Amino acid sequence: MPEFTHLHVHTQYSILDGAANISLLLQKARELGMNSLAITDHGNMYGVLKFFNEAKRQGIKPIIGCEAYIAKESRTKKEKTRGKQYYHLILLAKNKTGYHNLAKLTSLGYLEGFYYRPRIDKEILEKYSEGLIVSTACLGGEIPQAILNQSEDKAQEAIDWFKSVFKDDFYLELQNHGTQEQKSVNEVLRRLAEKNEVKVIATNDVHYINKEDFNAHDILVRLNTGADINDTKDDLHYTGQEYLKSPEEMLELFPEVPEALDNTQEIVSKVEEYDIYNPILLPKFPIPDGFDGENEYLRHLTYEGAKTLYPEITDDIRERLDFELKVVGEMGFPGYFLIVQDFINKAREMDVIVGPGRGSAAGSAVAFCTGITSIDPIKYNLLFERFLNPERVSMPDIDVDFDDAGRDKVLKYVVDKYGKEKVAQIVTFGTMAAKLAIRDVARVLKLPLPDADRLAKMVPERPVLH
């Protein structure tokens, strides 16, 4: 069996364009005899953590990457012109430096280059090129586009630039989904590869796992583009070959260039084993003069709050507070409590409505005394250990609710005080519930509305448990 690794792979985190569940994708790769696999979602790294953990669990070497959008000019140029304003490019991290640079590039794509897509450009790609392996992507890549629409000279110019920046970590990518355009481009790519002493790799533009998943993926893409089943828009360009093919199937596609499969293993061997986890980095809370560090100041705030909340600080209350403060200190989280109480109490000063607290944080008397929560855990016999347990070290999770109108004021306060480079918002991914999915699919399939409604209403409001 030939050795081969898929290095151009989209998961469900290529939103509404990828239909590959990460766990099932890795399982399929293992069944096909592959011991490594890449993740290269469109313009983002949303699925990387899940992919990394699941790959490790299944005994597969994870190769972390991204199919980046490269602005044709500057990432800061955001003017509507004819045609797409970007090319595609595969970026793979070969070590931890490359992983950090990949994260930097994808972030800058959203923060500085977003225009329909999160775009980077060659300026920042060169700046953050260390530790990255690059391949030319699909027909949407700069070099394939030059071959199709401009000239080999233009393709050569691009090759010269990539070789100058990435040296031997630059590869020309061959794909074969059965289209004439790909066959024509592949012929030129192979000729240019030989001329420039650049290696070629074989890839399949994986968007779903099994061949029979094509129809479901097709519907997903039509949902994204607003097309129905009869539409033949230019952007509905999938052929039914974009699944996770076996090494044998890939060799059948490239019998004349078996080295294109071998070179995927060269890339795998270049990718080092590294951990993507880092220690928790919290902003530094400014401690007022007269206090010796975060532990002492947190103790001060806790007991000052207790004086106002309890008629008397009994031995039981003191014992509970001292125990919690000891655990918080030993686990290294006093700064976290200070930051959270800071913006919550500031929110109240700004007349922003703050929720009383929910989840396990309501079991903390320190949280109650510092104003983080409004529920007395001692009165209601709530367990602190559900929130923080020294035998299971994990970052405390304090859920906070603000009213919609005042939420932005709180965010601005946090950013202004601690610095925008130290504050991030966490994405939430919405998924289609069963009823909505049925109605959306029915629209694509042009099913009459009464039939779609009847089918949707057959789905129970809650799953039936047997």
Image (cartoon, grey):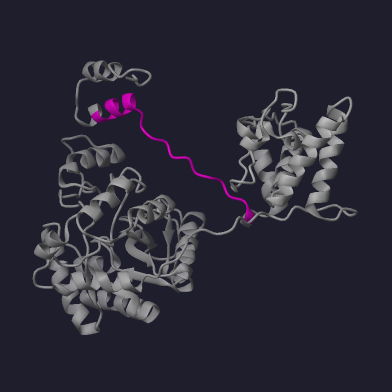
- Identify whether 197 is placed above or below 426: below
In reply to whether residue 423 is colored magenta, the answer given is: yes
Looking at the picture, tell me which residue is in the foreground, 374 or 381.
381
Image quadrant of residue 413?
top right
Q: How many marks?
A: 0
Residue at 44% over, 63% down: 102
Residue 293: x and y in percent read 81, 55
For the C terminus, the quadrant is: top left
**Does residue 283 appear left or right of residue 463 in this picture?**
right
**Does residue 410 appear left or right of residue 76 in this picture?**
right
Residue 244: x and y in percent read 21, 53
Residue 161: x and y in percent read 35, 78
Image quadrant of residue 459?
top left
Can residue 339 be spotted in the picture?
no
**Does residue 390 appear left or right of residue 439 in this picture?**
right
- Identify whether 168 is placed above or below 41: below
Looking at the picture, tell me which residue is in the foreground, 343 or 53.
53
- Identify whether 429 is placed above or below 404: below
Can residue 315 be spotted in the picture?
yes
Looking at the picture, tell me which residue is in the foreground, 280 or 121.
280
In reply to whether residue 132 is colored magenta, the answer given is: no
**Does residue 326 appear left or right of residue 162 in this picture?**
right
Residue at 89% over, 27% down: 312
Looking at the picture, tell me which residue is in the foreground, 82 or 307.
307
- Identify whether 32 is placed above or below 358: below
Give the residues drawn in magenta, as a range.
422-441
